Amino acid sequence: MFSRLLLINTLSSLNFYVSIPLMPITRDNWEYFFQGAFAEYHVCSLFYFYGYEAQKISPDIGIDWMVTNVARARFNNENPLNVEVQVKSALFDQTGAFVKMHADEIDFLCEGEHRYCVFVLLSNLSGSDDPGSYERGDDPDASMAVERDIMRNWEGRASLEGRALRRKGSLSIYDFSEADVTIFWLHSSQMKRLRDNGLLEEANDGWRGLQIKAEEHRFSVAGMTLIPELYDLTYIVRPCKAGSRIRQGHMSMLDY
């Protein structure tokens, strides 16, 4: 892993430097690379579903997608829009999730009026059974019962302690075929609040971590239960009644 200095040209024409850690794909991180790519393109597809364009930013300057509304402005008489979106993914189990980011990246995500971090959580991993449609025998279903029991056992363990098993190299998300996907987003002002209030946990070598927990049917970030608006990606690109509060850094009913 190494870093290089990149010049960032923001939409506000403000130029500054940020050190972006570059991580070449290896045997140890290839699964995380593909998981991240899934999360990025899943978010991208949702913006297209809403009628917005999403352009991939290359090289990596700390932003995954530039979201625009060129078609909507042309055909729906909307004001031009440019939104910067970074996507982070994590496996979520009963112990929660932990998203690591480099300090330089966090600083970058804390700036910009139209900059957002979108979090994609994968939970309840489940596997499919080979139906053996052309198998023959007195009871072909019984012959596959052991395989089904093994998969159900792994589903349960993944739900309980998938993160720890994955760190040990005992579990891969690619041993499964489906997962529940939960998405929430944070505006730059909310990221700044988390940083400035010391709510990002120290990891190592300049990295910080964001602790995510389940709170009944909601998620909490650094101990603050998120308001419902933050689960809806449309509010990144469309007006929101709570928008002015969100852009002040408010994110929980504790801010009421």
Image (cartoon, rainbow, N blue to C red):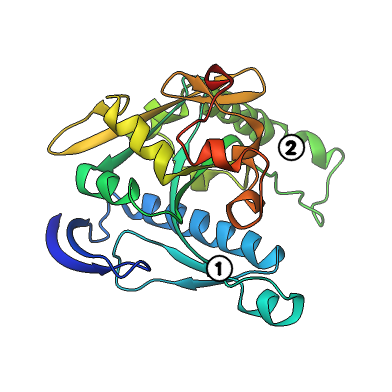
Query: Upstream in the sequence, badge 2 or badge 1?
Result: 1
Q: Choose between 222 and 132: the one closer to the eye.
A: 222
Q: At which x and y percent is residue 55?
A: 49, 73
Instruction: Kindly identify the residue that appears in the image at 51 percent across and 26 percent down.
Output: 93
Q: Choose between 118 and 169: the one closer to the eye.
A: 118
Q: At which x and y percent is residue 99?
A: 37, 36
Q: How far separated are the C-alphas under marks 2 and 1?
A: 57 Å
Quadrant containing the C terminus in the rendered view:
top right
Q: Secondary structure at mark 2?
A: helix
In the drawing, does residue 31 fall left or right of residue 236?
A: left
The quadrant in which residue 98 appears is top left
Instruction: Kindly identify the residue that appears in the image at 77 percent across and 49 percent down.
Output: 131
Q: Is residue 78 above or below residue 63?
A: below
Instruction: Kindly identify the residue that appears in the image at 70 percent across and 49 percent down.
Output: 130
Disc 2 marks which amino acid? Ser
Q: Which mark is residue 81?
A: 1
Disc 1 marks which amino acid? Leu
Residue picked out by circle 2: 143
In the drawing, does residue 159 fall left or right of residue 239?
A: left
Q: Secondary structure at mark 1?
A: loop
